[in-house]
Image (cartoon, rainbow, N blue to C red):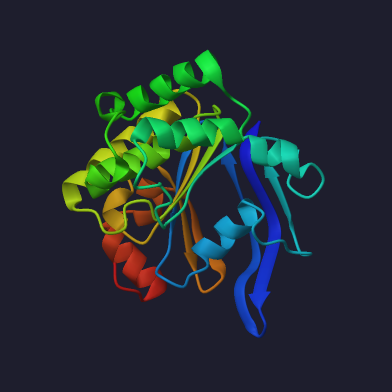
Amino acid sequence: MKGIEVAQLSYSYGAKQALDDVSFAVEAGQFCALLGPNGAGKSTLFNLLTRLFTSPQGTIKIAGHSLNGSPRKALATLGIVFQQSTLDLDLSVHQNLKYFAALHGISGHKANMQIEASLEKLGMLERAGEKARLLNGGHRRRAEIARALIHNPSVLLLDEPTVGLDAAARASITDHVHQLCDDGTTVLWATHLTDEVRDEDRLIVLHQAHILADGLTKEIRGGSALKDKFLNLTGASA
């Protein structure tokens, strides 16, 4: 089964075309980097995948469920980490996750067990009692990813999840998310930073509403550094 299937998807803001006939599929358990400069259409695609936006043109399936035909089933399989942080800074990490679990109808002992499991996956269990505002940027991001895993989603979407973090924090978070794929989670990771993409990752290069390349990173970059290949494809700064 495919984790994500997108076919002939288009979206425009008035006269501005944000996505133009975009099609791709991500296998279950695969880490797929969606690489593109700012303004390429990455966030628009994420807004469509999460049904914040809808389009009459094209189809989307999440874990086999049509986002148009069965939106509740499709969205129930998704974990989402948006670019902007949405933690309540006055609550502890555990309280943030407990509230989110309740939104998914998970409570009591089951909620506590799933919160513990999610925090452990992200190396955050020892910080469960800390207020979110006391965490550094990297740990806040890990807490958000752990929160997105509370309901055991099969597909995880992350929109520029390392924005504003230092190199060490970015590397730590990409490591943790790659490990999730080893457990079968499908990951779509949007970024404009080439150093977050590994040779064995699936790579989609998006630029000016179109997919310019789609395949394994090492095959797309060939004998060049990915940064140079990206620059040649898009004319953008990597």
Q: Is residue 19 visible?
A: yes
Residue beneath the point at 70% across and 44% down? 61
Residue 184 percent coordinates (x, y): 50, 26
Residue 4 percent coordinates (x, y): 62, 43
Question: Is 147 located above or below residue 198 in the figure?
Answer: above
Residue toward you, 113 or 9? 113
Q: How many marks?
A: 0
Question: Is 70 located above or below residue 236 in the figure?
Answer: above
> Residue 116 falls in which quadrant of the image?
top left
**Residue at the extreme top of the image, as rendered:** 109
Residue toward you, 238 or 180? 180
> Residue 176 falls in which quadrant of the image?
top left
Going by the image, does 232 lie left or right of 166?
Answer: right
**Residue at the extreme bottom of the image, as rendered:** 15
Residue 223 percent coordinates (x, y): 28, 55
Residue toward you, 127 or 218? 127
Question: Is 164 located above or below residue 65 in the figure?
Answer: below
Going by the image, does 38 lie left or right of 99?
Answer: left
Residue beneath the point at 28% across and 65% down? 228
Quarter holding the N terminus is top right
Residue 110 percent coordinates (x, y): 53, 16
Question: Is 117 located above or below residue 8 in the figure?
Answer: above
